[in-house]
């Protein structure tokens, strides 16, 4: 079985712009590309798992979201980093779908697609729901705190940025 690192997009890979609507708003966070590149070197799958309810709310289309993700891939590629897959939930929080974090539909789909053992995987994010998603799926959770991080989260690890999180994963997976 392969392992993966699931990464939240907004606030973890890129600056959290409330309902990012266009590729021009995309801005990589410090340490993001370096962290993803290190994960690539570890030969683990790097998978983005992101809630994007702005689609259901009519703030942007799935085509707009695709352009934002293309920009993310391009910016990471310029720095020698790559994403293996992107899963997103386009639904409204009230839709009660199985894919919206903290539910684990996106992670389970990735596990089926890539032959992953979720109990050996990691999830990195900046919010309580990312940590809860990890807990619900049996993944090790790593929090990168932001100004919007809720206190009192039962997380496995807290790291300063994605690069520091990747170093921790490198250590834990090669012990």
Image: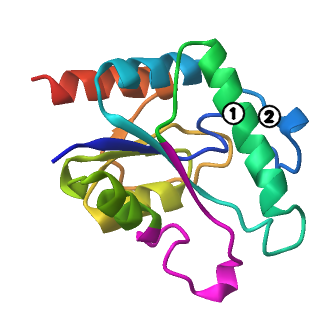
Of all residues, the one furthest to the top in this rendering is 79
Q: Where's residue 88, x and y in %? A: 60, 60
Image point 34% across, 18% down: which residue? 41
Q: What residue does disc 2 label?
A: 26
Query: Where in the figure is residue 85, as x and y percent of width and height?
Result: 50, 45
Please give left or right for residue 131 compared with residue 167 in the image. Answer: right
Numbered range of the magenta stretch: 85-105
- Quadrant, the C terminus: top left
In magenta stretch: residue 93 = yes
Evaluate whether residue 133 shows in this view: yes
Q: Residues within 10 Å of mark 1 (few under 14, many from 20)?
A: many
Instruction: Say left or right for 66 vs 102.
Output: right
User: Which of the 4 image quarters holds residue 69?
Assistant: top right
Q: Residue at x 25, y 52 (%)?
A: 116
Instruction: Determine the secondary structure under disc 2.
Output: loop
Estimate the x, y position of residue 32 in percent, counting from the top left. Answer: 57, 24
Mark 1 — residue? 72
Q: Do callouts 2 and 1 mark residues in contact (Cβ within 8 Å)?
A: yes
Looking at the rendered structure, the secondary structure element under dot 1 is helix
Q: Report, in whole angstroms, how far the alpha carbon at label 2 lies from the one at label 1.
A: 7 Å
């Amino acid at each position: 079985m392969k392992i993966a690192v699931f990464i939240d997009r907004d606030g973890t890979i890129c600056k959290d712009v409330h309902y990012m609507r266009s590729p021009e708003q995309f801005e990589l966070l410090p340490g993001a590309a370096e962290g993803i590149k290190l994960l690539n070197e570890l030969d683990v799958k790097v998978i983005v798992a992101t809630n994007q309810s702005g689609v259901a709310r009519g703030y942007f289309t799935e085509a707009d979201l695709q352009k934002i993700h293309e920009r993310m891939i391009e910016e990471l590629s310029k720095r020698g980093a790559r994403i293996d897959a992107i899963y997103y939930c386009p639904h409204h929080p009230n839709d009660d779908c199985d894919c919206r974090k903290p539910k684990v539909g996106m992670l389970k789909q990735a596990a089926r697609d890539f032959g992953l053992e979720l109990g050996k995987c990691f999830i990195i994010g900046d919010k309580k729901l990312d940590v809860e998603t990890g807990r619900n799926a049996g993944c090790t959770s790593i929090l990168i705190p932001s100004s919007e991080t809720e206190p009192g989260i039962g997380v496995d690890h807290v790291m300063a940025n994605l690069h520091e999180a990747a170093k921790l994963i490198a250590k834990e997976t090669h012990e």
